[in-house]
Image (cartoon, grey):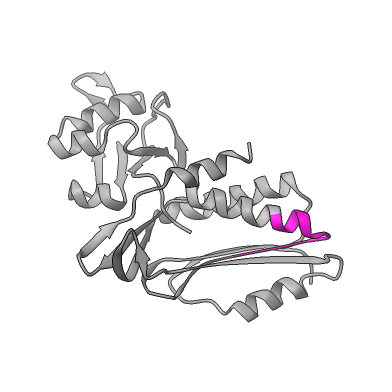
Amino acid sequence: MLKILFFGQLKEIIKTESLEIEIIQSGKQLNTVAKLRSLLQAKGEVWNEYLAYGKALVAVNQEITNDDTVLNDADEIAFFPPVTGG
Amino acid sequence: MSHFTQICVQSEDFDFAHQYQKLRDSNNSDGALVTFVGLVRDMNLQQSVSGLFLEHYPAMTEKVLINIVDKARAKWQLGSVSIIHRIGQLQVSEQIVFVGVTSQHRQSAYHANEFIMDFLKTQAPFWKKETTTEGDKWIEAKASDMDKSRRWS
């Protein structure tokens, strides 16, 4: 099971704070961030727009990373807009 | 007392004098102490702002801030480093962030303080939502902030 979190404006727009997804989808493994991102983008128009590469950053197990990152079962994946603290 | 690293993410306000004193008390070998405090402004892009809501990613925030301090310590010889970042609802003119750095000489302290702020602004998982007269509005990241963090590499 993958644990997926959303933050900031993205969380509000897709009206979702967190999700759990099986790492095996239709017999295939969601083994990279890119594959997970595509699966989530297919959930609807706003998901497609706001989760697009370049628009939503991704962290795997609390570290900012890129779409080539390999996913393992029980990973925590977070998608969020560019940060604006300070 | 000896040199320390302090990282706090909290909803409560902080007392500048107390934080400054803690840094001063941490040693007698450092001749420089540089502090930065970020405040909530009343205007952003022409709309009148009455307050700010700060969201963060709890499991990740502290990790990122520790990592930024480690990077600063690898670049400059530093004494104590303190970062306090507030979360939740803040009003105009309230304190948002405190960064304090000590070192033997001023140049390292100035540079490290700015380095920490530049990376905090582009890497630490905080998001600001402004309360304005025209409704709530998420603040968009600025390209100029990315440029500032890139100049250190």
- Horizontally, residue B64 falls left or right of residue A17, namely right
**As drawn, which residue projects farthest toward the front?**
B46
Q: Residue at x 31, y 52 (%)?
A: A8
Seen at 25% across and 41% down, the residue is A20
Image coordinates of residue B149 in percent, x first then y, are 56, 43
Q: Quadrant of the N terminus of chain B?
A: bottom right
Measuring from the top left, give residue A31's x and y in whole percent. 35, 23
**A44 to the left or right of B108:** left
In the image: residue A16, left or right of residue B99: left
The range drawn in magenta is B99-110
Verify whether residue B106 appears in magenta. Answer: yes
Is residue A23 at least partly visible in the picture?
A: no
Residue located 27% across and 51% down the image? A9
Taking B9 as reference, is A62 above or below it? above
* Of residues A15 and B128, the one drawn nearer to the viewer in this rendering: B128
Location of residue A80 (image quadrant): top left
Residue A63: in magenta span: no
